[in-house]
Image: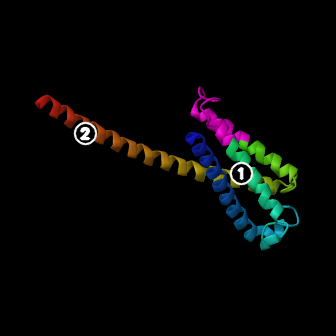
Amino acid sequence: MKDKVLVLYKIISQILIIFSVTLLFIAFIGIAVGEYAKEYSTMFSLGNKGMSFDIIFQILLSSVVVSLINQIFYSKKLFKNMMTLWKRVLMIISIIAAIVVFIICFKWFPINLVEAWIGFFVSFGGFFLVSTAIMITKTKREAKKYEELLENYKKKRSKEEDNNESN
C-alpha cells in the first residue's frame, strides 16, 4: 500500500511540474508574442493579458497525458527489455504525437501555419534539451552519491573484517 501511495505521489508531482513549467513557458511566450498570436491561436486569445481557464485546463490535461506516457515507457513491466535509448526515442515520438493531437483538437494554432509549427518544434526541442540536461546532471549527482556510499560501506566492512580477524 505504501508503495502505491509513493508511486501516486511521484506521478502527481511529475504532472504538477510539467504543468507549472509549461504554464510559465507559455506565459513568457504570450507576453512576447501574445498580441500578434491572438489572431491565430486559441492559446493566446487574450493576447498578452493572460490565458483563459479553458487553456489552463487543456494544459493540465496535456500534462497528465505526457506524464502517463512517461510512466508507461519507464514501466518495468512493459518495456523492460528495450534499450534506454529506444525507450527515450519512442517516448519523445509519443509525446510529440499526443501534443499534436492537442494542437489540432483544441486549435492551439492553425495546422497550416508554418511559423507556428517551427515555434512548436523549437520550443519542444528546447524543453527536451533542458530536461535532458537536468536528468543527466541529476543522474551524475546520484551516481556520485551512491559511489560515496559504496566506498563508505566497503571501508566499514573492511574495518569489521579486520576487527573479526584480530579477535
Q: Position of residue 98 (x, y in %)?
A: 77, 44
Task: Specify the segment rendered in magenta.
Answer: 69-94
Identity of the residue furthest to the left in this view? 166
Assess whether residue 74 is covered by the magenta stretch.
yes
Q: Which mark is residue 119?
A: none
Image quadrant for the C terminus? top left
Q: Is residue 46 left or right of residue 137?
A: right
Label 2 packing within 10 angstroms: few (<14), some (14-19), many (20+): few
Give yes or no for contact between labels 2 and 1 (Cβ–Cβ under 8 Å).
Answer: no
Question: Relative to 112, is 4 above or below?
Answer: above
Dividing the picture into quadrants, the one containing residue 146 is: top left
Residue type, numbered disc 2:
Lys
Q: Earlier in the sequence, mark 2 or mark 1?
A: 1
Which residue position is annotated with label 1?
63
The reply to whether residue 92 is in sight is: no
* Residue at the spot 82% in from the left edge and 51% down from the top edge: 103
Give me the residue at 20% from left, 37% from top: 159
Residue 156, image quadrant: top left
Q: Is residue 157 above or below residue 62?
A: above
Whole-Å distance between the Cαs marked 2 and 1? 45 Å
Q: Secondary structure under badge 1?
A: helix
Return the x and y of residue 30 as percentages of the image width and height: 75, 67
Q: Which mark is residue 156?
A: 2
Q: Specify whether 11 is left or right of 113.
A: left
Residue at (67% x, 60% y) in the render? 20
Q: Residue furthest front?
A: 1
- Classify mark 2: helix, strand or loop: helix
Measured as percent of width and height from the top left, residue 116 is found at 80, 56
Mark 1: amino acid: Ser
Q: Quadrant of the N terminus?
A: top right
